[in-house]
Image (tube, rainbow, N blue to C red):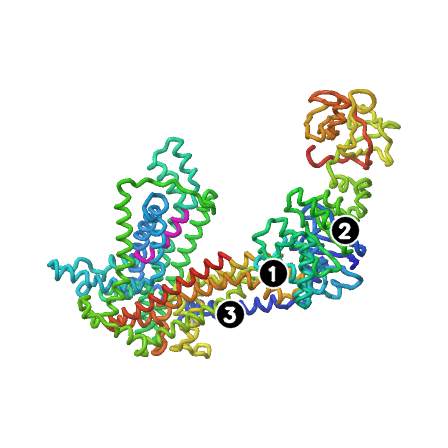
Amino acid sequence: MNTLTNARSKPSFGTPELLFMLSVGVLVIVVAVPMLLIFFNAFWVDGHFNIADVVKVLQRKETYQALLNSLILSGGVTVTGTLVGTFFAWLVTRTDLPFKKTMKLLFLVPFMLPAFIGALAWKMLLSPRAGYINRLFMDVFGFDNPIFDIYSYAGIILVETMYLFPFVFIQVSGALERMDPTLEESARISGADLFTITRKITIPLVLPSILSGALLIMLYSMAHFGTVAVLGVETGIYNIPVLIYEKIHQSAGSFDSIRTATVLATVLVITAALILWLQNRVLSKGKYQIIAGKSFRPTELKLRGLRIPMLIVCIVYIGLTIVLPTATIFLVGGLKTYGLPFDLENMTWANYNHILFEWDLTRDSIWNSITLGLASALITMFAGVIISYVIVKMKVRGKGILEFLGMLPFSVPGSVIALGVILAWSGKFGINLYNTVWIILVAYIARYMAFSLKANSAALEQVHDSLVEAARASGASMAQALRDVVVPLVRPGMVAAFFLIFLPALRELTVSVLLYGPTTRTIGVAIYTLNEDGETVYSAALAGIALIIIVLGEVLIKRLVTSKNGA
Amino acid sequence: MASIEIKGISKRYAGRTILSDLSLELRDGECFTLLGPSGCGKTVLLRLIAGFEAPDSGRILIGGDVVADADSGEMLPPDKRSLGMVFQDYAVWPHMTVFDNVAYPLKLAGIDALELKARTMRTIELVGLTHLDQRLPSQLSGGQQQRVALARALVSEPQLLLLDEPLNNLDANLREEMRFEIKALQQKTGVTILYVTHDQEIALGIADRIAVMDEHGNLRQIGTPEEIYEYPRDDFVFRFLGIANFLPLRREGDTLRVGQSSEVWTGMQPDKEGNMLTAGFRPSDVVLSRDGAGLPGTIRRASFLGAQFDYLIEIAGTLIRAALPSHVCIAHGLLFSEGDSCRVTLATVQWFEGQIVAAEKV
């Protein structure tokens, strides 16, 4: 006992403790303080805790309506997205659909496309009066009314479904691929028909994956700003993030509107936490051993006469959700004036030329997004690798706090992070970053830290302790062991983290739209505000440029990742 | 080359004592094996010597220099202890070629390029990996990775080589081959080796001296392989070095009787006092006959294992195992079947005081 107390009482403040304190410090400033300020502002009125006021805010018609809309929209998207995702997942894994592999890749493309750009395209196609499709039907086919009004609950749900269904698609197709086919075969031998097998064996086994994907859709849709903001504004449909945006933006920091925003943010955080908790439960319950990491060759259902019709369904779906909106964006971006028919004489390169080389606003936005993306990706990558190192490798007490703080933003919607950053960095603590590019950077770092921690922790866990110890035994100092062994082995994880942050940051809208100032628009903000201001063709042209940058980035990361794995 | 002195070392983890007041000395240039069951703290001791752990009390000296002292808090980091170490999982760096792995210690030592290349290639040759120097570890078999780890540990000609169950994951043939190679290397280079293992066969085969450690981290016996095997200090050591038979005896006046029965012990007389004794012996110490002198036994199970017959025999309520060379059985008509009766005599007996129950099933 004596020796134990002796050993403990020795003052031990070495590198591990220093790194630990540093990591905690960074996360507290970047993550914890903004979050706490939101709760503080929501529940603390005139120096004391006040829950009655919170209830009062929630009972207001607009808050109540925003909550209701969020529920309707995310509920609707969850149902449709899950159905669509599960159906296509089954189709590409368990049937003899032609070109299955290609189809599978194509179904993942919507993940790359920013939903608000999709919303923009669909607005151009299906807005009740000006939408090209609606006009086609009214002008050419003589319809009296537009065939579809995209400015509606159904319209918003439809567009969000197109871009969020991959959450379910990925989870379910993965589970179906890894499921041992002998499970189904043995049921077959026991005398069950295909319908019974599907009902009694297949669906129960993939249900956890379906549910987990569905909850991800719900989480994302709850926190989603862009689509609702673009499509809901005309008819007054708004959800919680949109209302937070309006509160912050339009009432220029009055106490009441900030309070309302913090209360809304609190509701959003609690909902998100609930969804993630549910997802965790579903996943831990559903961890059947039978869905192993191994890849099996699953039994395929013969579609027979339905083979070609099903292929056509897939092609039409992909055509409608990917090709049509993307083409619309580029074509509208090339129009001389919005609303003109797509004739060659109406097309021009001038818009692209203007936004790329002439107009400060758009040029700045591209520059801002690229520098912000690079800076946040680099900072988060390096901070993430250090913090992950402390979490994974070091024996210091209380590193659970680090893990919690780092992963927290993962469950916190972007608008909440932005709001927290506004509260923390608008001069309250002597530093006022409001309206500067720095406040966006801070928010990006908070938002994307979890990405970096995930990628780096995964890489670090592969680096067994004995590899470092072997270097030490070979005569390497700790620094040399890190340089020669740990860093080279973690580099792929760091590269992955970089791109996991850089690409989403490039197209970020939800956070930056709350934080931008006159000269600090990002690409997302510029596209959004141009569209708001009626500059539709420039908005589309910029969206087209954004799509090109995003796709190039995605291709580049695929190249890098596969060549790393190949070596 | 270096001696190691371990003086009164204690180590705890999460309130659990792993080692307490342990002292041990390794002579310069010897191959010393630390033998013990898994989880007994032998790896911890190795890590203490390497400098990956600091002792809670006690001192460690390598080559006469203090490398760790709990009282003064002195602690030489692993990279300053000039040792070579082979880890249980090899710990070959996956992003470096064989050459780079082996050359790394020399690179750190600042050896100039020409000599570095020569020495690295020489060591690679020594462990039999010539022509594989540009391979990545992922392109090597487990045994080859093992050799890379060994070469890396040897290349800088350390005073001390620490081996942590390095042959564990190898198949039987390769294990034997590597065992001979390590021994040969040690004789060639004169390095002091501390070899940690739970495999008594490797320990007996490779060591100049062996220390047997029990599951509580206490050293039970230190000695040459022959001493340990032939003169185990207690039943733990005896049991740990091979299949052990224990036959309980009780003293009634001048006679010894077997177990609870009235059967009289006719074998050699014990060198121990006491009313309760246990005779320990190996399966190979058992001599069987159909009749004549010896304890009466009944064959309970007979299995043919090729080179030998393995019999399970009941003597006065106790089960023992006997291993007889096949050619002896055939030449002397000792092919028993289950239920046959036999006579048992013992070539050698280890005497232990008190009643010892064989822990594992025979």
Point out residue A87 in the picture as x, y percentages from the top left corner: 32, 47
Point out residue B338 in the picture as x, y percentages from the top left corner: 69, 22
Q: Mark 1 near mark 2, Cβ–Cβ under 8 Å?
A: no
Could you tell me which secondary element the residue under label 1 belongs to?
Answer: loop
Question: What amino acid is at disc 3?
Answer: Val
* Residue annotated with mark 2: B32
Mark 1 and mark 2, same subunit? no
Q: Which residue is nearer to you in this view: A102 or B254?
A: A102
Q: To which quarter of the image does residue B189 belong?
A: bottom right
> Over which residues does the magenta segment extend?
A161-175
Q: Is residue A95 left or right of residue B320?
A: left
Is residue A536 in the magenta section? Answer: no
Q: Residue furthest right?
A: B254
Q: Which residue is nearer to you in this view: B125 or B108?
A: B125
Q: Is residue A489 left or right of residue A125?
A: right
Is residue A296 in sight in this rendering?
A: yes
Q: In this view, does B230 lie to the left or right of A464?
A: right
Residue drawn 27% across the image and 66% down it: A330
Tell me if mark 2 has few (under 14), some (14-19) or many (20+) residues whose alpha carbon lies within 10 angstroms of its own. many
Q: To which quarter of the image does residue B263 belong?
A: top right
Mark 1 and mark 3, same subunit? yes
Q: Is residue B91 left or right of residue B226?
A: left
* Residue annotated with mark 1: A395
- Nearest to viewer (mark 2 / mark 3): 2
* Residue annotated with mark 3: A26
Q: Pointer 2 indicates a residue of which chain?
A: B
- Measured Cα–Cα span from mark 2 to mark 3: 49 Å
Could you tell me which secondary element the residue under label 3 belongs to?
Answer: helix
Question: What amino acid is at disc 2?
Answer: Phe
